[in-house]
Image: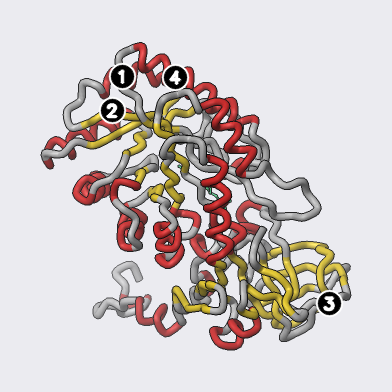
Amino acid sequence: MDHFQLKDGELACEEVGLAEIAASVGTPVYVYSTATMCRHVAALCEALEPLPDPLIAYAVKANPNGAVISTLAKAGLGADVVSGGEYRRARAAGVPADKIVFSGVGKTEEEMRLALEGGLYQFNLESLDEAEMLSAVAKAMGRTAPVGFRVNPDVAAGGHSKITTGAAENKFGIAIGDAPGAYARIATLPGLMVQGVAVHIGSQLTSLDPLDRAFTRLGELIAELRAAGHTIGVADLGGGLGVPHDPDHPAPPSPADYGAMVRRIAGGWNARLVFEPGRLIVGNAGVLLSRVIRVKPGATDPFVIVDAAMNDLMRPALYDAWHRIEAVRPSGNRRTANVVGPVCETGDTFATARPMDEVEAGDLVVFRTAGAYAAAMSSTYNSRPLTPEVLVDGKRWAIVRPRVDVDALIAADRIPDWLGGCADSPSS
Ligand code: LLP
């Protein structure tokens, strides 16, 4: 459930009409609901309730806005980070160091130093080479790095191939069969404290089966590692649970179903469980609010040209993702349309032949499920201003990231004082 509902015929976020936000901030603009985020946190906590002291480390990559991270930190969540930038953002937003998990295949020495200096709960290592680098960095700093390996369980997660991560051919983690040897190796390395194992097999998963298989394999590995003398007190089960997008499709398993599966498989592991949800928490807590620029006739259906584009919401262009599109003031008339942005690419298409509310120039529309991997992946392609973000909490709302306008884009460029143009270049 979310808190974007019709009030007096107009879509509102909690107590705030979206037209009011559009009039004040302009469009396109992302709008996030505090109540929806908090509801998702509560549903997950409730589902995991009987587990002793689980750590829910919000995957910052889904939505790294400081106000979002801070809301979740106040709700008790930690952070899963994959870069020095995300580590710093999590800390700046108030996430305690001992609730931060550092994932990612390409951690650099500098990022390792940053996290060791500031503290963290666990590095999830993805290769032996990385373990050796971290060992050297930690030793040089006189620190001990808490670590686990992210293992690749070779489970096809289903879903889109660009976001599946747990199949053997993917770049992530170490092959689960190599794990006993890898743990034996890192047990001998200075500066590392081996404490856990980790797995993350993909995103927007709509079935529990692949997770069930991955966790079962992880449980077998934990037993094997313990039998070999390793202390495994932490099991990081990653993120990946899908969220409902399309009311005409069956909803993915609920947090309660997920929690029951986790408790069945991992409840007896005698390890602290870590979770890294991203989309589940913020996906349906955000919309992208946009205005129709014009409606242009098409060969079959009309083109509804909106002022948001693929640079603001990349998911349809990148993954053929389906986002529900609704008029902020639905007239009750429905028609089929193509919804596109102004960017000069055919891929700048949000929906093709989509039955939707009839709209005309000047009307406001929303793209639903735009709280995760939306603003986070936006760019200024076609020199379009970076879309602002607004956070709503009941009747209150605030701009939590202002629009980065074209003046700022131009001002960020540097023209070298030697620049002479093509006529003066050495190769001319
Ligand atoms: N943990 C790790 C190590 C991850 O790589 C990810 C996501 C998560 C947790 C969070 O997964 P979630 O619970 O949000 O599914 N841009 C794509 C999604 C990429 C996900 C990358 N990793 C999209 O827009 O669908």
Residue depth check, mark 3 versus mark 1: number of the one nearer the observer: 1
Residue 367 seen by the camera: yes
Indicate which disc, 4 or 3, sits on the residue closer to the N terminus: 4
Compare residues 404 and 233 and report the one nearer the observer. 233
Q: Earlier in the sequence, mark 3 or mark 1?
A: 1
Whether ligand 1 has any atom under 8 Å from the Cβ at mark 2 is answered as no
* Inter-mark Cα distance, 2 to 1: 8 Å
Cα gap from disc 4 to disc 3, whole angstroms? 59 Å
**Where is residue 385 shown, x and y percent of the image?**
50, 77
Earlier along the polypeptide chain: callout 2 or callout 3? 2
Let me know if residue 154 appears in the view.
no
- The answer to whether mark 2 and mark 1 are in CB contact below 8 A is yes
Amino acid at pointer 3: Pro
Give the SS element for disc 1: loop
Q: Which residue is mark 1?
A: 230
- Secondary structure under the numbered disc 2 in the rendered image: strand
- The answer to whether the residue bearing label 4 lies less than 8 angstroms from the nearest atom of ligand 1 is no
**Callout 2 crowding tier (Cα within 10 Å): few <14, some 14–19, many ≥20:** many
The numbered mark, 1 or 4, whose residue comes first in the sequence reads 4
- Residue designated by label 3: 297
In contact (CB < 8 Å): disc 4 and disc 3: no
Q: Is residue 149 above or below residue 9?
A: above
Q: Residue at x 88, y 68 (%)?
A: 300
Q: Position of residue 280 (x, y in %)?
A: 57, 51
- Inspect the image, locate mark 4, and give the three-letter code of the amino acid beneath it: Leu
Q: Identify the amino acid type marked 2.
A: Val
Q: Residue at x 65, y 58 (%)?
A: 316
C-alpha gap between disc 3 and disc 1: 67 Å
Q: Which residue in the structure is indicated by mark 4?
A: 221
